[in-house]
Image (cartoon, rainbow, N blue to C red):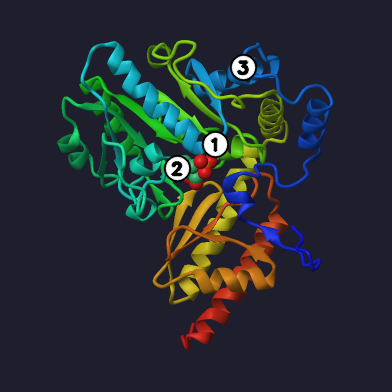
Amino acid sequence: MFDDQGNSYLDFVAGIAVNTLGHAHPAMVKAIGEQAATMLHSSNLYHIPKQIELADKLVWLSGLDRVFFCNSGAEANEAAIKIARKYFHDQESPRRTVITATNSFHGRLLSTLTATGQDKVKVGFDPLPSGFIHVPLNDIDALKSAINDQTAAVLLEPLQGEGGVNLADTAYLKAVRKLCDEHGILLMLDEVQTGIGRTGKMFAFEHSGIVPDVLTLAKGLGGGVPIGAMVANEKVASAFAAGSHGSTFGGNPLSCAAALAVLETIEQEGLLKNVNAQSVRLKVGLQRMVKKFAMAESVRGSGLLLGLACSSAVAPVIESCKLKGLLVLPAGPNVLRMLPALNIKTGEVEKALEILEAALEAVEADRGVES
Ligand code: PLP
């Protein structure tokens, strides 16, 4: 990336996990250009061939059955919350409550900020909708105690991004799946940040061997063109008939053309393999920082969604990185987050680590710490 002064930056923010293929990838330029020259938008009153193609692809990749398209992560989660309620409404069941995790982040709509397990996003927006409960992540007993005859669904991020790069354990996810099945409630996974190859598999849930009833996607799906998706199994999807829910822009020809280009390029360029290889390189480099710097405590995350957890505020390190030509971002006050494009190259990872090391050195020197 270049700024208005001509300074160049290595982009390890990627529009907050959006620019899957980096910037100006030829496949994106071609797909978007061709679609713009054909038809940008037609509304969902008509069948959109690229939307059908994209839905087929997501169904095939996820093992689920049907897709609802919208424009953002919050909208995808809103659709998930609505379909969970409608599913139980149709069975004349009182189940309406959604359980989510402490420190989760699910978006900024009234429903999704209430679902979010962080108080800071709620301040000033009351009255908030009812029907949301929060439990600590990775604590199966807390979840067991929270489930009752009002519970409709559990909504979790397999790896919390905004909340501090916190991984849901495989054993926990398996136990949650089992618990949901035992109670006949839905397991919904928010993969808005982790989906589309970010963790080294197409979807993060694949690491744990479980399959959710509902999966939400956005961010990386369009590679920079806004699109969101709620993917559901047939049992749940049948709760939405034509007219139950909708979106004017959702799944329009342009956003679907972009998303198809993202998915095709991930496959053609073998990018999942690259994510795994660069993840190891980045993790090893970050572990080196943990050994070298007093403030660096641990490395968290998976694939190319990694966090360096620190004992103090990371804002000065992020600022120093920026001045030295590297863009990174926080995940909470004390975690420095890195989520570059999936096609990041070895030399770029090495350069980013060099800059981060220099930034940590500068910040610790400023604070009078000897490394
Ligand atoms: N869910 C998760 C896990 C996210 O990380 C985000 C955004 O950071 C959202 C939902 C909300 O997505 P959007 O900003 O596209 O509404």
Q: Is residue 64 left or right of residue 81?
A: right
In the drawing, what numbered circle is on residue 72?
1
Q: Earlier in the sequence, mark 2 or mark 1?
A: 1
* Structural distance between the alpha carbons of marks 1 and 3: 17 Å
Q: Secondary structure at mark 2?
A: loop
In the drawing, what numbered circle is on residue 95?
none
Q: Is residue 117 left or right of residue 237?
A: left
Any atom of ligand 1 within 8 Å of the CB at mark 1? Answer: yes
Q: Secondary structure at mark 1?
A: loop
* Snapshot quadrant of residue 268: top right
Q: Which marked residue is nearer to the observer: mark 1 or mark 3?
A: 3
Any atom of ligand 1 within 8 Å of the CB at mark 2? Answer: yes
In the drawing, what numbered circle is on residue 107?
2
Q: Type of residue at label 2?
A: Gly
Classify mark 3: residues with Cα within 10 Å, few (<14), some (14-19) or many (20+).
some
Location of the N terminus by quadrant is bottom right
Residue 289 can be seen in this image: yes
Classify mark 1: residues with Cα within 10 Å, few (<14), some (14-19) or many (20+).
many
Quick check: marks 2 and 1 in contact, CB under 8 Å? Answer: yes
Classify mark 2: residues with Cα within 10 Å, few (<14), some (14-19) or many (20+).
many
